[in-house]
Image (cartoon, rainbow, N blue to C red):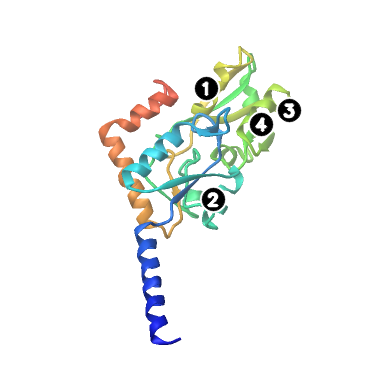
Amino acid sequence: MNKSTFLPACLLLLLAMVISCANPPPVSIGTEGAYPPFGYLNDAGELEGFEIDLGNELCQRAGLECVWVTNDWDSMITNLRAGRYNTIMAGMSIAEERDELIDFTQPYFPPERSVFAALAGSAEDVTRERVAVQTATIQADYLAGKVTELIEYGLAEETIQAVLNGRADSTFASHSYLKDIVAASQGQLDFVGPPVSLDSGVGIGVREEDDELREKLDEAIGSMKEDGSLNALIIRWFGEGEPTF
């Protein structure tokens, strides 16, 4: 290559690098899209829910361009670590076992109760018999070895069908997820047994090496706590009965 062609090539490379730095790739957010009211697909096939509204607001406050990526729940952490997306917002409770694999921001949803639901009129014994849970959850971990049969499903909604169809005696999940389902069951389902406290709240999952991204999102969550907008969003999606900050 002679000097006359080498110089323009260098300039083009430099220009490409400047453009790349000025326009970094968007931050991708992994979510399940099957866990209302945190996040779900509406009738138009679009993502909707508390975390979708929250994530969009956090990205705006952090000065980030963000895109959403749907992923099966049971491979959520695996695919974050593999680089399929940059963060997780999927109703994921901050738990010690998960914190050994990835990092979390401060919680954007407070610690809450996990509860059992069963057919209306069931005795408390059903919480120790055939219990349906979503796989890879803190509820599944808690009940391992404590019940007659732990039946795990890939989707949370399948645990409800298992109870209604008689394949399970009860299901065990967060109160925020089960309360609307129980209320809409027209008396078929009811809560049974005492609630259990298991988690430290729900946070955004990030790869351990992505400290800068975690800090930006942490700051955005903190600003929403300070101005009250995070509590307002929680009440909008979950009602007055759920805990706030």
Q: Earlier in the sequence, mark 4 or mark 1?
A: 4
Residue 179: mark in rendering: 1
Q: Which residue is mark 3?
A: 167
Residue at image x 33%, y 46%?
Answer: 62
Residue at image x 34%, y 42%?
Answer: 60
Residue at image x 39%, y 57%?
Answer: 24
Q: In the depicted view, which residue is nearer to us: 187 or 66?
A: 66
Q: Which residue is mark 4?
A: 158
Classify 79 as above or below 136. Answer: below
Classify 153 as above or below 241. Answer: below
Classify 24 as above or below 42. Answer: below
Cα distance, mark 1 to mark 2? 27 Å
Residue 244: mark in rendering: none
Does residue 146 appear to the left or right of 54 in the view shown? Answer: right
Query: What amino acid type is highlighted by mark number 1?
Result: Lys
Query: What amino acid type is highlighted by mark number 2?
Result: Ile
Q: Are marks 1 and 2 in contact (CB under 8 Å)?
A: no
Tell me where residue 198 appears, x and y as whole percent.
Answer: 48, 37
Dot 3 falls on a residue whose secondary structure is loop
